Image: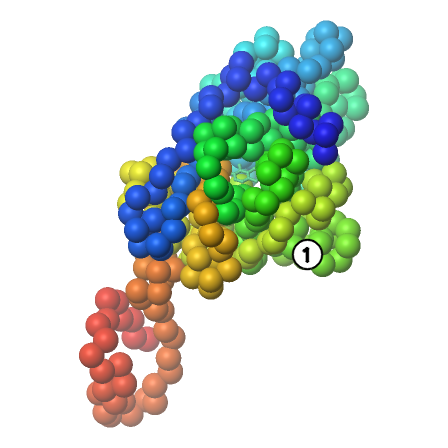
Amino acid sequence: MQDYVRRILTSSVYEVAEQTPLDTMNLLSARLGAKVLLKREDMQPVFSFKIRGAHNRIAQLSEAERARGVICASAGNHAQGVALSASRLGIRAIVVMPTTTPTIKVGAVRRLGGEVVLFGDGFDAARGHAAELAEKHGYVVVHPFDDPDVIAGQGTIGMELLRQHPGEIGAIYVPVGGGGLAAGIAAFVKFLRPEIRVIGVEPEEAASMKAAIAAGHPVALDQVGLFADGVAVRQVGDETFRICRELLDDIVTVTADEICAAIKDIFDDMRAIAEPAGALALAGLRRQVETGEAPKGALIAINSGDNVNFDRLSYVAERAEIGERAEALFSVEIPEQPGSHRAFSRMHGQRSITEFNYR
Ligand SMILES: *Cc1c(COP(=O)(O)O)cnc(C)c1O
Protein backbone atom coordinates (compact mmCIF):
# COMPACT_ATOMS: atom_id res chain seq x y z
CA MET A 1 0.00 0.00 0.00
CA GLN A 2 2.99 2.26 0.49
CA ASP A 3 3.31 2.44 -3.28
CA TYR A 4 -0.26 3.73 -3.53
CA VAL A 5 0.29 6.31 -0.82
CA ARG A 6 3.31 7.60 -2.74
CA ARG A 7 1.34 7.73 -5.99
CA ILE A 8 -1.48 9.60 -4.26
CA LEU A 9 0.77 12.14 -2.56
CA THR A 10 2.55 12.94 -5.82
CA SER A 11 -0.56 12.95 -8.01
CA SER A 12 -1.10 15.85 -10.41
CA VAL A 13 -4.92 15.72 -10.33
CA TYR A 14 -5.17 19.34 -9.20
CA GLU A 15 -4.18 20.51 -12.67
CA VAL A 16 -7.80 19.81 -13.62
CA ALA A 17 -9.68 18.59 -10.51
CA GLU A 18 -10.80 20.67 -7.53
CA GLN A 19 -10.37 19.99 -3.85
CA THR A 20 -14.10 19.60 -3.14
CA PRO A 21 -15.82 20.70 0.09
CA LEU A 22 -16.60 18.31 2.94
CA ASP A 23 -19.99 19.63 4.04
CA THR A 24 -21.83 18.86 7.27
CA MET A 25 -25.38 17.61 6.71
CA ASN A 26 -27.09 19.51 9.52
CA LEU A 27 -30.65 18.29 9.03
CA LEU A 28 -29.72 14.66 8.58
CA SER A 29 -27.24 14.74 11.46
CA ALA A 30 -29.96 16.03 13.79
CA ARG A 31 -32.37 13.37 12.57
CA LEU A 32 -29.92 10.48 12.90
CA GLY A 33 -28.19 11.67 16.08
CA ALA A 34 -24.77 11.34 14.43
CA LYS A 35 -22.42 13.80 12.76
CA VAL A 36 -22.83 13.17 9.02
CA LEU A 37 -20.57 14.80 6.45
CA LEU A 38 -20.76 14.67 2.67
CA LYS A 39 -17.74 14.84 0.34
CA ARG A 40 -18.95 16.89 -2.59
CA GLU A 41 -17.40 15.16 -5.60
CA ASP A 42 -20.46 16.28 -7.53
CA MET A 43 -18.80 19.70 -7.57
CA GLN A 44 -15.96 18.61 -9.85
CA PRO A 45 -15.80 20.26 -13.31
CA VAL A 46 -17.46 17.19 -14.92
CA PHE A 47 -19.86 16.66 -11.99
CA SER A 48 -18.12 13.48 -10.80
CA PHE A 49 -14.79 12.34 -9.31
CA LYS A 50 -13.85 10.41 -12.46
CA ILE A 51 -11.71 13.34 -13.65
CA ARG A 52 -9.22 12.48 -10.88
CA GLY A 53 -8.39 8.95 -12.01
CA ALA A 54 -8.52 9.77 -15.71
CA HIS A 55 -6.18 12.73 -15.33
CA ASN A 56 -3.74 10.94 -13.04
CA ARG A 57 -3.39 8.24 -15.68
CA ILE A 58 -3.24 10.46 -18.77
CA ALA A 59 -0.86 13.03 -17.26
CA GLN A 60 1.74 10.29 -16.74
CA LEU A 61 1.87 9.12 -20.34
CA SER A 62 5.18 9.46 -22.17
CA GLU A 63 5.57 11.90 -25.05
CA ALA A 64 5.32 9.01 -27.51
CA GLU A 65 2.09 7.74 -25.89
CA ARG A 66 0.61 11.23 -25.85
CA ALA A 67 1.25 11.55 -29.56
CA ARG A 68 -0.74 8.35 -30.17
CA GLY A 69 -3.85 9.52 -28.28
CA VAL A 70 -6.07 7.80 -25.71
CA ILE A 71 -9.23 5.73 -25.96
CA CYS A 72 -11.91 4.52 -23.54
CA ALA A 73 -15.27 2.81 -23.70
CA SER A 74 -17.87 4.46 -21.48
CA ALA A 75 -21.34 5.87 -21.64
CA GLY A 76 -20.93 7.77 -18.45
CA ASN A 77 -18.75 9.82 -16.18
CA HIS A 78 -15.44 8.19 -17.10
CA ALA A 79 -15.90 9.33 -20.71
CA GLN A 80 -16.24 12.94 -19.60
CA GLY A 81 -13.21 12.69 -17.33
CA VAL A 82 -11.06 11.27 -20.12
CA ALA A 83 -12.27 13.85 -22.64
CA LEU A 84 -11.63 16.81 -20.33
CA SER A 85 -8.22 15.63 -19.14
CA ALA A 86 -7.02 14.83 -22.66
CA SER A 87 -8.19 18.12 -24.11
CA ARG A 88 -6.45 20.07 -21.33
CA LEU A 89 -3.22 18.23 -22.14
CA GLY A 90 -3.69 18.65 -25.88
CA ILE A 91 -4.09 14.90 -26.48
CA ARG A 92 -6.57 13.22 -28.82
CA ALA A 93 -9.30 11.31 -26.98
CA ILE A 94 -11.51 8.71 -28.64
CA VAL A 95 -14.59 7.64 -26.69
CA VAL A 96 -16.52 4.56 -27.79
CA MET A 97 -20.14 4.71 -26.64
CA PRO A 98 -22.97 2.24 -27.22
CA THR A 99 -25.38 3.44 -29.93
CA THR A 100 -28.08 3.51 -27.23
CA THR A 101 -26.28 6.27 -25.26
CA PRO A 102 -28.56 9.27 -24.59
CA THR A 103 -27.70 12.20 -26.86
CA ILE A 104 -27.16 14.43 -23.82
CA LYS A 105 -24.14 12.30 -22.83
CA VAL A 106 -22.80 12.11 -26.37
CA GLY A 107 -23.07 15.89 -26.57
CA ALA A 108 -21.27 16.38 -23.23
CA VAL A 109 -18.28 14.31 -24.36
CA ARG A 110 -18.09 16.14 -27.71
CA ARG A 111 -18.24 19.53 -26.01
CA LEU A 112 -15.28 18.50 -23.87
CA GLY A 113 -13.31 17.78 -27.01
CA GLY A 114 -13.73 13.97 -27.20
CA GLU A 115 -14.18 12.19 -30.54
CA VAL A 116 -17.21 9.98 -30.11
CA VAL A 117 -17.51 6.62 -31.89
CA LEU A 118 -20.95 5.05 -31.54
CA PHE A 119 -20.78 1.27 -31.67
CA GLY A 120 -22.90 -1.72 -30.64
CA ASP A 121 -25.93 -1.83 -28.41
CA GLY A 122 -24.26 -2.50 -25.10
CA PHE A 123 -21.21 -1.71 -23.06
CA ASP A 124 -19.45 -5.03 -23.75
CA ALA A 125 -19.63 -4.45 -27.50
CA ALA A 126 -18.34 -0.91 -27.10
CA ARG A 127 -15.43 -2.10 -25.00
CA GLY A 128 -14.54 -4.77 -27.53
CA HIS A 129 -14.55 -2.18 -30.28
CA ALA A 130 -12.35 0.17 -28.24
CA ALA A 131 -9.80 -2.63 -27.75
CA GLU A 132 -9.83 -3.28 -31.49
CA LEU A 133 -9.29 0.38 -32.34
CA ALA A 134 -6.50 0.61 -29.76
CA GLU A 135 -4.80 -2.41 -31.30
CA LYS A 136 -5.15 -1.06 -34.82
CA HIS A 137 -4.21 2.58 -34.26
CA GLY A 138 -1.98 2.39 -31.19
CA TYR A 139 -4.24 4.44 -28.87
CA VAL A 140 -3.57 4.09 -25.15
CA VAL A 141 -6.53 2.52 -23.31
CA VAL A 142 -7.64 4.37 -20.17
CA HIS A 143 -9.50 1.87 -18.01
CA PRO A 144 -12.29 3.26 -15.79
CA PHE A 145 -11.10 1.51 -12.63
CA ASP A 146 -8.65 -1.41 -12.89
CA ASP A 147 -5.41 0.55 -13.20
CA PRO A 148 -3.01 1.66 -10.43
CA ASP A 149 -2.81 5.25 -11.71
CA VAL A 150 -6.59 5.51 -11.95
CA ILE A 151 -6.98 4.06 -8.46
CA ALA A 152 -4.37 6.48 -7.09
CA GLY A 153 -6.14 9.43 -8.74
CA GLN A 154 -9.41 8.51 -7.00
CA GLY A 155 -7.40 7.99 -3.80
CA THR A 156 -6.61 11.72 -3.63
CA ILE A 157 -10.12 11.99 -2.14
CA GLY A 158 -8.89 10.00 0.89
CA MET A 159 -5.99 12.40 1.32
CA GLU A 160 -8.34 15.40 1.22
CA LEU A 161 -10.72 13.84 3.73
CA LEU A 162 -8.03 13.30 6.35
CA ARG A 163 -6.85 16.89 5.96
CA GLN A 164 -10.34 18.35 5.98
CA HIS A 165 -11.46 16.42 9.08
CA PRO A 166 -8.47 15.94 11.37
CA GLY A 167 -10.72 14.94 14.30
CA GLU A 168 -12.26 11.58 15.08
CA ILE A 169 -13.80 9.79 12.10
CA GLY A 170 -15.83 6.65 12.71
CA ALA A 171 -16.36 5.50 9.15
CA ILE A 172 -16.12 6.53 5.51
CA TYR A 173 -18.80 5.16 3.18
CA VAL A 174 -17.78 4.75 -0.46
CA PRO A 175 -19.90 3.73 -3.47
CA VAL A 176 -18.52 0.71 -5.32
CA GLY A 177 -18.86 0.04 -9.05
CA GLY A 178 -15.67 -1.47 -10.44
CA GLY A 179 -13.98 -0.66 -7.12
CA GLY A 180 -11.43 1.99 -8.17
CA LEU A 181 -12.79 4.72 -5.91
CA ALA A 182 -13.05 2.43 -2.88
CA ALA A 183 -9.60 0.92 -3.47
CA GLY A 184 -7.95 4.34 -3.76
CA ILE A 185 -9.60 5.83 -0.69
CA ALA A 186 -8.98 2.68 1.40
CA ALA A 187 -5.31 2.50 0.34
CA PHE A 188 -4.65 5.99 1.69
CA VAL A 189 -6.92 6.05 4.73
CA LYS A 190 -6.04 2.57 6.04
CA PHE A 191 -2.33 3.32 5.73
CA LEU A 192 -2.49 6.42 7.91
CA ARG A 193 -5.60 5.95 10.04
CA PRO A 194 -6.29 2.20 10.23
CA GLU A 195 -8.89 2.73 12.99
CA ILE A 196 -11.26 4.47 10.55
CA ARG A 197 -13.69 1.99 9.05
CA VAL A 198 -13.88 2.14 5.26
CA ILE A 199 -17.15 0.65 4.07
CA GLY A 200 -18.14 -0.11 0.49
CA VAL A 201 -21.77 0.39 -0.57
CA GLU A 202 -23.41 -1.38 -3.52
CA PRO A 203 -26.96 -1.61 -4.86
CA GLU A 204 -28.50 -5.00 -4.07
CA GLU A 205 -29.02 -5.49 -7.80
CA ALA A 206 -25.38 -4.75 -8.75
CA ALA A 207 -23.34 -6.11 -5.83
CA SER A 208 -20.33 -7.28 -7.84
CA MET A 209 -17.70 -6.60 -5.14
CA LYS A 210 -19.73 -8.43 -2.52
CA ALA A 211 -20.03 -11.40 -4.89
CA ALA A 212 -16.29 -11.31 -5.64
CA ILE A 213 -15.35 -11.29 -1.96
CA ALA A 214 -17.73 -14.18 -1.28
CA ALA A 215 -16.26 -16.18 -4.18
CA GLY A 216 -12.63 -15.28 -3.41
CA HIS A 217 -12.11 -13.84 -6.91
CA PRO A 218 -13.92 -11.44 -9.30
CA VAL A 219 -17.02 -13.06 -10.79
CA ALA A 220 -19.39 -11.87 -13.53
CA LEU A 221 -22.93 -11.24 -12.30
CA ASP A 222 -25.66 -12.77 -14.50
CA GLN A 223 -27.74 -9.64 -14.25
CA VAL A 224 -27.02 -6.07 -13.27
CA GLY A 225 -29.67 -3.52 -12.30
CA LEU A 226 -29.14 -0.26 -14.17
CA PHE A 227 -30.88 2.17 -11.80
CA ALA A 228 -27.58 3.41 -10.35
CA ASP A 229 -25.89 3.43 -13.76
CA GLY A 230 -22.62 4.86 -12.41
CA VAL A 231 -21.99 1.64 -10.46
CA ALA A 232 -23.71 -0.89 -12.74
CA VAL A 233 -20.60 -3.01 -13.25
CA ARG A 234 -20.90 -6.71 -14.04
CA GLN A 235 -17.45 -7.68 -12.78
CA VAL A 236 -14.97 -5.82 -10.56
CA GLY A 237 -11.30 -5.50 -11.50
CA ASP A 238 -8.46 -7.78 -10.41
CA GLU A 239 -6.42 -5.03 -8.80
CA THR A 240 -9.42 -3.25 -7.27
CA PHE A 241 -10.58 -6.60 -5.87
CA ARG A 242 -7.15 -7.33 -4.39
CA ILE A 243 -7.15 -4.01 -2.51
CA CYS A 244 -10.83 -3.98 -1.52
CA ARG A 245 -10.72 -7.53 -0.16
CA GLU A 246 -7.76 -6.65 2.01
CA LEU A 247 -8.79 -3.19 3.17
CA LEU A 248 -12.56 -2.70 3.18
CA ASP A 249 -14.07 -3.36 6.60
CA ASP A 250 -17.50 -4.22 5.26
CA ILE A 251 -19.80 -4.03 2.24
CA VAL A 252 -23.37 -2.84 2.67
CA THR A 253 -26.04 -3.35 0.02
CA VAL A 254 -29.08 -1.10 -0.32
CA THR A 255 -32.28 -1.02 -2.37
CA ALA A 256 -33.17 1.44 -5.12
CA ASP A 257 -35.78 2.94 -2.79
CA GLU A 258 -33.17 3.60 -0.13
CA ILE A 259 -31.02 5.31 -2.77
CA CYS A 260 -33.97 7.53 -3.71
CA ALA A 261 -34.46 8.46 -0.04
CA ALA A 262 -30.76 9.41 0.15
CA ILE A 263 -31.11 11.60 -2.97
CA LYS A 264 -33.87 13.42 -1.10
CA ASP A 265 -31.68 13.77 2.03
CA ILE A 266 -28.97 15.40 -0.08
CA PHE A 267 -31.48 17.73 -1.66
CA ASP A 268 -32.98 18.67 1.72
CA ASP A 269 -29.59 19.52 3.24
CA MET A 270 -27.64 20.86 0.25
CA ARG A 271 -30.15 21.76 -2.46
CA ALA A 272 -28.06 19.55 -4.74
CA ILE A 273 -29.42 16.72 -6.87
CA ALA A 274 -27.26 13.61 -6.75
CA GLU A 275 -27.37 10.88 -9.37
CA PRO A 276 -28.32 7.46 -7.93
CA ALA A 277 -24.68 6.28 -7.70
CA GLY A 278 -23.86 9.62 -6.09
CA ALA A 279 -26.30 9.06 -3.23
CA LEU A 280 -25.49 5.36 -2.84
CA ALA A 281 -22.88 5.79 -0.10
CA LEU A 282 -25.21 7.95 1.97
CA ALA A 283 -27.91 5.27 1.67
CA GLY A 284 -25.41 2.76 3.11
CA LEU A 285 -24.49 5.15 5.91
CA ARG A 286 -28.13 5.61 6.84
CA ARG A 287 -28.70 1.87 6.78
CA GLN A 288 -25.84 1.29 9.23
CA VAL A 289 -27.02 4.06 11.58
CA GLU A 290 -30.51 2.59 11.56
CA THR A 291 -29.30 -0.96 12.30
CA GLY A 292 -26.91 0.28 14.99
CA GLU A 293 -23.86 -0.95 13.07
CA ALA A 294 -22.37 2.51 12.47
CA PRO A 295 -19.36 3.26 14.69
CA LYS A 296 -19.04 6.31 16.96
CA GLY A 297 -17.39 9.44 15.58
CA ALA A 298 -18.08 11.43 12.45
CA LEU A 299 -19.56 9.51 9.53
CA ILE A 300 -18.53 10.55 6.04
CA ALA A 301 -20.28 9.61 2.78
CA ILE A 302 -18.86 10.29 -0.66
CA ASN A 303 -21.31 11.98 -3.04
CA SER A 304 -19.63 10.70 -6.18
CA GLY A 305 -21.63 12.48 -8.87
CA ASP A 306 -24.55 14.57 -10.08
CA ASN A 307 -25.06 13.43 -13.67
CA VAL A 308 -28.72 12.57 -13.75
CA ASN A 309 -31.28 13.13 -16.47
CA PHE A 310 -33.93 15.60 -15.44
CA ASP A 311 -36.71 13.26 -16.52
CA ARG A 312 -35.62 10.63 -13.96
CA LEU A 313 -36.44 12.92 -11.07
CA SER A 314 -40.17 12.22 -10.94
CA TYR A 315 -39.41 8.54 -10.44
CA VAL A 316 -36.87 9.36 -7.72
CA ALA A 317 -39.28 11.67 -5.91
CA GLU A 318 -41.99 9.03 -5.90
CA ARG A 319 -39.74 6.23 -4.65
CA ALA A 320 -38.08 8.40 -1.99
CA GLU A 321 -41.23 8.24 0.15
CA ILE A 322 -41.11 4.48 -0.05
CA GLY A 323 -37.40 4.43 0.84
CA GLU A 324 -38.28 6.56 3.87
CA ARG A 325 -40.84 3.94 4.81
CA ALA A 326 -43.30 6.86 4.97
CA GLU A 327 -45.25 5.25 2.14
CA ALA A 328 -45.70 1.72 0.84
CA LEU A 329 -46.80 0.29 -2.48
CA PHE A 330 -49.15 -2.71 -2.41
CA SER A 331 -50.66 -4.87 -5.07
CA VAL A 332 -53.70 -6.83 -3.83
CA GLU A 333 -56.28 -9.04 -5.43
CA ILE A 334 -59.85 -8.65 -4.20
CA PRO A 335 -62.75 -10.98 -5.03
CA GLU A 336 -64.97 -9.85 -7.91
CA GLN A 337 -68.13 -9.48 -5.81
CA PRO A 338 -70.26 -6.71 -4.25
CA GLY A 339 -68.85 -5.32 -0.98
CA SER A 340 -65.28 -6.34 -1.75
CA HIS A 341 -64.04 -2.80 -2.05
CA ARG A 342 -65.68 -1.78 1.22
CA ALA A 343 -64.08 -4.74 2.98
CA PHE A 344 -60.73 -3.72 1.57
CA SER A 345 -61.22 -0.14 2.76
CA ARG A 346 -61.89 -1.34 6.30
CA MET A 347 -58.64 -3.27 6.26
CA HIS A 348 -56.44 -0.23 5.74
CA GLY A 349 -58.37 1.61 8.47
CA GLN A 350 -57.04 5.09 9.28
CA ARG A 351 -54.02 4.93 6.97
CA SER A 352 -54.22 7.44 4.15
CA ILE A 353 -54.09 6.46 0.51
CA THR A 354 -52.18 8.70 -1.91
CA GLU A 355 -52.91 6.79 -5.09
CA PHE A 356 -55.29 3.99 -6.02
CA ASN A 357 -55.56 2.04 -9.24
CA TYR A 358 -58.18 -0.55 -9.99
CA ARG A 359 -58.28 -2.89 -12.93
C1 LIG B 1 -17.71 5.47 -11.57
C2 LIG B 1 -18.61 5.92 -10.52
C3 LIG B 1 -18.73 5.26 -9.27
C4 LIG B 1 -17.98 3.98 -8.95
O1 LIG B 1 -16.58 4.08 -9.05
P1 LIG B 1 -15.71 2.76 -9.24
O2 LIG B 1 -14.31 3.22 -9.22
O3 LIG B 1 -16.10 2.16 -10.57
O4 LIG B 1 -16.05 1.83 -8.12
C5 LIG B 1 -19.58 5.78 -8.33
N1 LIG B 1 -20.32 6.88 -8.57
C6 LIG B 1 -20.25 7.56 -9.73
C7 LIG B 1 -21.08 8.76 -9.91
C8 LIG B 1 -19.40 7.09 -10.75
O5 LIG B 1 -19.35 7.75 -11.92
Would the CB of label 1 be found within 8 Å of ligand 1?
no
Pick the front one: 72 or 325: 325
The three-letter amino acid code for the residue at tag 1 is Ala
Q: Which residue is mark 1?
A: 211
Give left or right: position of 206 versus 137.
left
285 up-or-down from 108: above or below: below
Which residue is depicted at the point 50% across and 47% down?
A: 170
Total residue callouts: 1
Determine the secondary structure under disc 1: helix
Can you give x and y, in whole percent of width and height, for residue 124 in the image? 68, 41
Which residue is depicted at the point 34% across and 86% down?
A: 334
Residue sitting at the far bottom: 338
Can you give x and y, in whole percent of width and height, for residue 123 in the image? 63, 40
Residue sitting at the far front: 167
Whether residue 315 is visible to the viewer of this picture, yes or no, is no
Pick the front one: 329 or 119: 329
Give left or right: position of 128 versus 94.
right
> Which quarter is ligand 1 in?
top right
Pick the front one: 138 or 87: 87
What is the quadrant of residue 136 in the picture? top right
Can you give x and y, in whole percent of width and height, for residue 339 in the image? 23, 92
Give left or right: position of 262 versus 9.
left
- Figure colour scheme: rainbow
230 up-or-down from 6: above or below: below
